[in-house]
Image: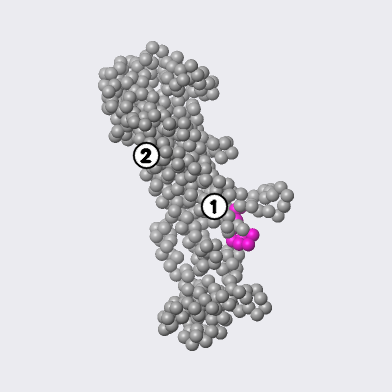
Amino acid sequence: MVPRYSRPQMEAIWSPAERYRIWFEIEALAAEAMAGLGTIPAEAARVIRDKGAPRAAAIGDAEVARIDEIERVTRHDVIAFLTFMAEGIGPEARFMHQGMTSSDVLDTCFSVQLTRAADLLIADLDALLAALKTRAIEHRMTPTIGRSHGIHAEPSTFGLKLAGHYAEFARGRARLVAARAEVATCAISGPVGTFASVDPRVEDFVAGKLGLAVEPVSTQVIPRDRHAAFFCALAVVASSIERLATEVRHLQRSEVREAEEYFHPGQKGSSSMPHKRNPVLSENLTGLARLVRGYVVPALENVALWHERDISHSSVERVIAPDATIALDFALGRLTGMMEKLTIYPQRMAANLESLGGVVHSQKVLLALTQAGMSREESYAAVQRAAMATWEALGTPGGRNFRANLEADPTVSALLSPAALEAAMDPRRDFAHVDTVFRRVFQDA
């Protein structure tokens, strides 16, 4: 991922130096487990830890370059790493990697990296949920118009709108927690996963120390259905980000102007038009969401490997794992800041709500007529006549609002008195159960 969309904590998880440090920890733990079982000398495990740990901790650009230099000869990344470590550990290094295969190190390391990335993303979601809850409660009863197909439907509140997004991200968080558990697996089972040259107790020991579960059947690699589920969970969160970003983009349109991204002092919206205040953050989030979703298909295609293993998945994961998690981490942070500072215009919301002359109350009038004795078909026709007359004459000198057109219809006035019509169109009816929804979503709100 390009630096523009990277945050240091997530980026560090995927750095070559950190990857090598995790590799060493896996190798050192395996050696300690083997020493405990008598497979290798206890002194060898101690030397591996005592000499290897500071060498791994000190890995920087020069050390990464040295490993790369070795790999140009060996054409094998794990062997290059083991050779580099042996240069500092000495003869006892021959007891590293006993009975293990490269995937034991690579896949277990990948699990560690993915779980660490998931922990950061879960924390990101917690921050976003907190911001959404604060703004939802703030605007619990701020009237706004609900829209379907982009057209005015019925009144709602801006708080309800945000509560819906909160609930969606809460579901996304639960999926990510489940996906984290699914990829938090360790495989130290040797070639083709049979434990022929490494005791299963070594795997148990390493897994426990790393906070992972053991992979029941590792076939030399951890099955990639686990990883596919992980990337699908990221993609769903990304889609939720785009849904909220798209909402902000629509609300910021010049014709709507109900909410907009915070416009910083000194910010410029256009190189040519000084008046512009563009929804650049939410547009950026839309693009990042497309990237994260784009990694799902390669992850799914990684599931079908040949026999006990091949490495067709490897090149894919080296790209999509850092890119997807770094991009989503950045996007969640950006969205949280955007929602914390979102500028909201309640007066504009109220004006838009009333801009169609009251037709947004059509369903309540329809129901009042049916309850007064008119058939549903006749009620619908009468209310639609009044609504269309209102709609088509909006802004003209002779135009009447919805209520006036209803009162002028003898089939309506015969059944609904002015007081009954006023009661049917009372906006307080739209918000009678807002608190019920809030209790369902937030429990304590």
Report x, y in % for residue 153. 51, 67
Report x, y in % for residue 321. 46, 36
Residue at x 41%, y 64% (from the top left corner): 436
Residue at x 65%, y 74% (from the top left corner): 395
* Screen quadrant of the N terminus: top right
Q: Which residues are magenta?
A: 254-262
Report the Cα–Cα distance between label 2 and label 1: 30 Å
Q: Quadrant of residue 183?
A: top left
Q: Is residue 433 left or right of residue 142?
A: left
Amino acid at pointer 2:
Asp
Magenta segment includes 72: no
* Screen quadrant of the C terminus: bottom left
Report x, y in % for residue 387. 55, 75
**Residue sitting nearer the eye, 189 or 384:** 384
Decide if residue 160 is in sight here: yes
Magenta segment includes 260: yes
Image position of 175 with respect to 194: above or below: below
What number is the disc on residue 374?
Answer: none
For the residue labelled by badge 2, is the local secondary structure a helix, a strand or a loop? helix
For the residue labelled by badge 1, is the local secondary structure a helix, a strand or a loop? helix
Residue at which label 2 appears: 225
Dot 2 or dot 1, earlier in sequence: 2
Image position of 329 with respect to 307: above or below: below
Prevalent SS, magenta region: loop
Residue at which label 1 appears: 245
Decide if residue 10 is in sight here: no
